[in-house]
Amino acid sequence: MSNIDPLTFPPGFLWGAATASYQIEGAAAEDGRTPSIWDTFSHTPGRTKGGDTGDEACDHYHRYREDVALMTDLGLGSYRFSIAWPRVQPGGRGSMNDKGLDFYQRLVDELLEQGITPWVTLYHWDLPQELEDAGGWPARDTAHRFAEYAALVHGALGDRVRHWTTLNEPWCSALLGYASGVHAPGRRHAPDALAAMHHLLLGHGEAVRAIRANDPQAQLGITLNLYAISPADPARDGDLEAARRIDGLANRIFLDPVLRGAYPQDVRADLAGISDFGFVHDGDLETIAAPLDLLGINYYSRHVVAAPDPGAPVEPYWRAPTSWPGSEDVRFLKRAGVPVTDMDWEVDAPGLTETLVRVARDYPAIPLYVTENGAAYVDVPGPDGQIDDVERAAYFDAHLRAALAALEQGAPLKGYFAWSLLDNFEWAWGYTKRFGLVAVDYTTQQRTMKTSGHRYREVIKRNGLAQ
Ligand code: IFM
């Protein structure tokens, strides 16, 4: 990096914040929107904390102008948001719903008027319920439906939107949605989860091809949630083996097909008792590896893993569904003295450096963006109503230093998006977890910038850290 000041980011570094449709929009039944798997899931008793749903969420659908004004106040260069598939193509097939599409037209126009680059994520988990009823992501046809939807959205917004992310965190869609079932649609069948993973990636590849064919200048990418992975004891073979397996299932099983055109052989061997990967048809991997302009990385924490406990009985996946099929016996450890966020995720900023440098080394030549990074903490408003979220501010500060360290080591990092602009619906956790730079009072819908937001504004203004 040709930086004189080690606390300054390269010129042109893109500063953003991210959100997702179901987490903030609300207006769940307005203007022709039909249910997604998350509407069904959150309305099913016992699936989310307190029975929370995204019916109203942050009411962003009606308050988007106010929210864009907050972005302007923060000085954001870009806003990453997702399109609700059942809002623009109810049922997931056929023609577009103009009223639903209008919302995104207005949002994009408002962003552009404020000089903020719109960055669209096409799929952040809200699959139209009808497509789930027809088989969901384990069904190959869903990939084709997604590519068709992607091309339609691009056709409507592509004259003004240059940056497109196909999928957000396919690991969560596949493994949390279809293996452990803690996310929508709440199914628990590991072989289906692997088929879902493949069809998500196939849909990604088909969408990239379709958009590229219409718009060779589009900036196209996918966002993966990558983890730093460590063996509990690097001198123990069993722990090293656990780290290999979890790295395979969390990171490489997505990175390799997308960026190298093949599933990793060792991971396929680990999963051989669950699936023969018969869902991979001739030509699929070539499609999945369609050239990209960028890779989005969502980084939150590290997994520290250890060999199975020899004394503990291992429950097979069909009796005790987990998010780690084939590796359900690997132990995930918490390190003594390492602080955790309100999600109980260890705060591990060096893991961000490690992840960026590792991707740059193992999958060279693709520009990288941190498309999400942030932390949930319990926010307690002071007597003046202000929220002095020093822990969240410190989390951002530490991770931005880690991003600088990665740049210093040569990682081609081009931008950073804080998760999240607003407190929002944290999936199965409902509204109990707060990630926002801006607090949301869900009773009044009042927005209040937190200390972390004020600090982020200073970082953006300075294109770096103060000291
Ligand atoms: O809120 C989620 C987001 O939807 C996807 N990435 C992780 C965030 C925090 O859990």
Image (tube, rainbow, N blue to C red):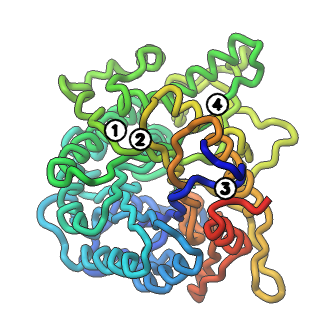
- In this rendering, the answer to whether 356 lies above or below 270 is below
Closer to us: 420 or 267:
420
Q: Amino acid at mark 4?
A: Ile
Estimate how packed mark 2 is, as few (under 14), some (14 to 19) or many (20 or more) residues with alpha carbons within 10 Å: many
Q: Earlier in the sequence, mark 2 or mark 3?
A: 3
Residue depicted at x 52% and y 33%: 359
Q: Amino acid at mark 3?
A: Thr
Q: Which residue is mark 1?
A: 196
Quarter of the picture holding the N terminus: top right
Q: Which residue is mark 4?
A: 229
Q: Earlier in the sequence, mark 1 or mark 4?
A: 1
> For the residues marked 2 and 1, what is the alpha-carbon distance in whole angstroms?
5 Å
Q: Assess whether mark 4 and mark 1 are in contact (beta carbons under 8 angstroms).
A: no
> For the residues marked 2 and 3, what is the alpha-carbon distance in whole angstroms?
38 Å
Asked which secondary structure carries label 2, the reply is: helix
Q: Which residue is mark 2?
A: 174
Q: Nearer the viewer, mark 4 or mark 3?
A: 3
- In this rendering, the answer to whether 271 lies above or below 400 is above
